[in-house]
Amino acid sequence: MNLAVRRLLALVAVFLSAFIAVAALRAWRNGNGLRDLFPIFSKNKTEYRPENYTFTEKVPLDLGEVELLSRLNEEYAKLTAAVVPSVVSIDTAGVQQERLVDFWGQTRGFRPNPTRGQGSGVIVTSEGHIVTNHHVIAGQQEFQITLHNGKKYSARLIGEDSLLDIAVLRIDSKENFTPLKIGDSSQVKVGQIVMAVGNPFGLGETVTQGIISAKERSLSENQRDLFQTDAAINPGNSGGPLINLRGEIIGINVAIFSPDKQNPGFQGVGFSIPSNDVKESLVQILERGRPIYGFLGVKISDLDRMTRSSLGNGAEIIEVTPDSPAQAAGLQPRDVVRAINGEEIVTPSQMLALLQRSKVGETIALDLWRAGRSLQVKATIGESGAANSPSPKPMGAGKAQDPEVVLEAIGVQVRDLSVRERMSGYRGVVVIGIAEQSIAQQKLAVGDLIVSVNNSRISGANDFYLYLAESAAAGNTNLRLIRGGQMVDVDLPVISQ
């Protein structure tokens, strides 16, 4: 054996000796024996010593010791079982026209964009009528209803109240369904126990329990007098019922407050539309196909700084509609409305909401400021409709004109509302650009919140462009918008080619 081989073997022997010494030291420190270094010689390689264990059959408390809680537990379960068969999940689908723009922001056509949504609802008649939120079904054309037992049905839209955020569907079936009774929300008290039922995040039927935290809460000037509850309400609960301990509907869940606007989640503050308001709108839709709003016949604006500094709050009348209840009552332009039926008017949008929610035929008392003196005038509320207000034009009934040409002539660019704006109760689109020498340059302003086209509420920018293009091709178009905290009506002329 030559010298090189002997040296190599010596190095290998030294290396193995060092490795075994280090491994043995580690095994000793860990409390193991030398056999554990070589698994083939270890006696424990397949051995497992079972653990001793003993379960207890003794409960900490007998049910007799917590009798009240035991009964409450059973009653919650009984209440839930009685209610959930009437609560449904709503899946929606539709196609909206998406505007295509070029590098310079000009409209270059439209393309269909499939949309899907999900929400909750509650059966309120034996015939299968369902109450849900308007924003659940807005802009959608197909509705699928899933019952508690898993059965699925198609449904059709009967009517909608965008102001109250209520819509009514009917299940396409001749079966008899199990409805929930609509309770009297005027009897609701702060602190009473309630349960919210719905389909949050599309997970399926969910029941949460809490109390009425407050009444007469407001998300916007249009959505007022809401119930606030700490029963957990999350995205997807919209349209589900808020029920009392008798299983009656006392509200329809509509919104939550969340500081995280990008990923909204329940923070202990949810809102519901009182059942009395829901029932009134429901009956009107079932009997007449639409909600009925009160009508006075005035256009109003906010007070200028000087007038507000001397009078305080109020709304100024800038126009009186001919042959309207306002004209019959003797109201005049430049009158300042300071209160209606004793309720102080703070903003024009608040006054508009009060008038729309007044009953047709009701006599209201208006506290006015006219030419330096106070006076009180009584007026009888009329019905908002074709005879006294702009009527909605049917979408899709316009002339066969190129929508690109129509929109280019109007020259307005809008964006969808942010999550924060929607959570604050607003609906519509915001003006972000106006083309020079266009029709919109003299009519609209950047920052305007457009809420309706010809009295039809819009759910987003795509809807707005589609409705505007079709309407302006057929005739004059009315836009209702909020500017500087006040409601403003803007009329656009027909666009002819």
Image (cartoon, rainbow, N blue to C red):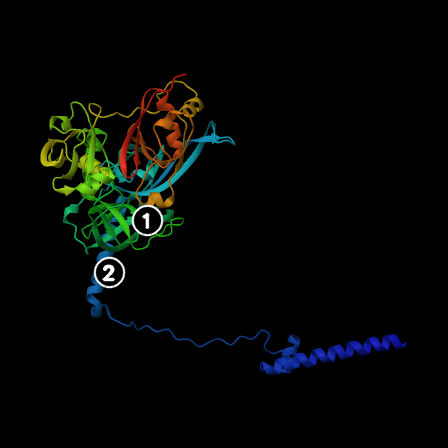
Q: Nearer the viewer, residue 58 or 203?
A: 203
The percent position of residue 18, horizontal first and vertical second, equals 72, 79
| Residue type at tag 1 | Glu
What element does badge 1 sit on?
loop
- In this rendering, the answer to whether 454 lies above or below 78 is above
Task: Classify residue 143 by image quadrant.
Answer: top left
Q: Which residue is mark 1?
A: 205
Residue 162 seen in the figure:
no
Q: Which corner quadrant holds the C terminus?
A: top left
Q: Which corner quadrant holds the N terminus?
A: bottom right
- In this rendering, the answer to whether 362 lies above or below 262 is above
Residue 378 seen in the figure:
yes
State left or right for residue 330 relative to residue 237: left
Q: Which residue is mark 2?
A: 73
- Categorize mark 1 by other alpha carbons within 10 Å: few (<14), some (14-19), many (20+): some
What element does badge 2 sit on?
helix
The percent position of residue 189, horizontal first and vertical second, equals 16, 53
The percent position of residue 82, horizontal first and vertical second, equals 23, 49
| Residue type at tag 2 | Asn
Residue at left offset 44%, top offset 77%: 52
- In this rendering, the answer to whether 37 lies above or below 137 is below
State left or right for residue 21 relative to residue 397: right
The percent position of residue 352, horizontal first and vertical second, equals 21, 36
